[in-house]
Image (spheres, rainbow, N blue to C red):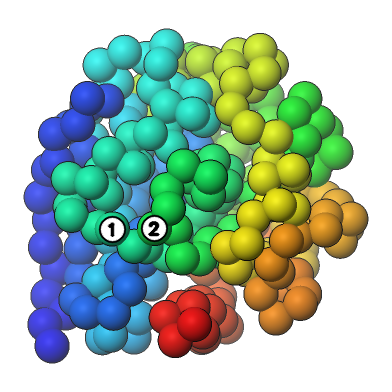
Amino acid sequence: MSTSTRKHTVVTSHGALAVEERGEGGLPVLLIHGNSFCRDVFRHQLQGRLAEKHRVIAFDLPGHGQSSNAVDPTTTYALGGLADAALELLDRLAVTEVIVFGWSLGGHIGIHMLSRFPGMRGLMITGSPPVPMGGMAQGFNAGPHMALAGKQDVSNTEIESFIHAIFGDGAEPFLRDAVARADGRFRKRLFEAARAGDGVDQRMTVESSPVPIAVVNGREDPVIKLDYFDTVAFGHLWEGQCHRLPGVGHVPFWSAPTDFNPILERFVRDVDIG
């Protein structure tokens, strides 16, 4: 079975989306990245064993990476709009069933997809506390990284600080390029929309959804409140627990892929066999 990389562009109503795929067969797996980054953060998953049995799809969100900026920033640069962009991408790719792995913002997008896509077979979230409407402070720690995450214009110093807060010493140059490239209107609009009540009540969504949800976080994650996850009564929590990987922070799939990837592969296998 071929695991060669296929890169192409998919035109949607939200803009032209840069897509990268590896593998085929089995349930497709969609990877959704975080605020101001790009699909390249999933390098270790795209090049891992998962693509030996599954079609693995990663893409740059509108206003990120090699994708175009949004056609209508007001509509697209909100959680509802980003979820719609992901669903439109799946439709263009003729994907009728999917497992989603979402990191940080990508996990929140995945939560928004739960009730909107009948073919959603499973969701894994990392660094994405499912907070209630208006309850961001319940799941996130305050800090400079949060201020920058919603700021339109950022300096080089702020970019360096943001990346270090997220990736620590494991940052590579492409991450700085990704944040510098990201459409600043995206960050500003995303937080404006959240404050205005855009989207769904994420806590209620995961507590009522029958879709298997896997929660895998880094035990040293400085961005999120890990104990918050234990207060959420997930409707279908995979393996009955929220996994915490020791010694890693907000990006366990990047900084510890040898520990993270087997968990992702196990979740995909479990969902695939029902």
Does 167 appear above or below 26?
above
In the image: residue 195, left or right of residue 106:
right
Which amino acid, by three-letter code, is at mark 1? Thr
Q: Position of residue 61 (x, y in %)?
A: 35, 38
Q: Position of residue 45 (x, y in %)?
A: 38, 72
Please report the residue visible at 75 percent of the width from the left and 44 percent of the height from the top: 203
| Quadrant position of residue 237 | bottom right
Please report the residue visible at 71 percent of the width from the left and 52 percent of the height from the top: 208
Does 160 appear above or below 164?
above
Please report the residue visible at 11 percent of the width from the left and 82 percent of the height from the top: 2
Q: Secondary structure at mark 2?
A: loop
According to the picture, the residue beneath numbered tag 1 turns out to be 96
Which amino acid, by three-letter code, is at mark 2? Gly
Q: Nearer the viewer, residue 62 or 175?
A: 62
Instruction: Return the disc, 2 or 1, that comes first in the chain's sequence.
Output: 1
Please report the residue visible at 73 percent of the width from the left and 61 percent of the height from the top: 235
Query: Looking at the image, do the residues carrying marks 2 and 1 touch, with CB atoms under 8 Å apart?
Result: yes
Does 196 appear above or below 158?
above
Q: Position of residue 141 (x, y in %)?
A: 81, 40
> In what quadrant of the picture does the N terminus appear?
bottom left
In the image: residue 222, left or right of residue 260:
right
According to the picture, the residue beneath numbered tag 2 turns out to be 119
In the image: residue 226, left or right of residue 67:
right
Q: Nearer the viewer, residue 74 or 272?
A: 272
For the residues marked 2 and 1, what is the alpha-carbon distance in whole angstroms? 6 Å
Q: Position of residue 39 (x, y in %)?
A: 34, 52
| Quadrant position of residue 134 | top right
Q: Secondary structure at mark 1?
A: loop
Q: Nearer the viewer, residue 93 or 46?
A: 93
Circle 2 crowding by C-alpha within 10 Å: few under 14, some 14–19, many from 20: some
User: Looking at the image, can residue 232 be seen?
Assistant: yes
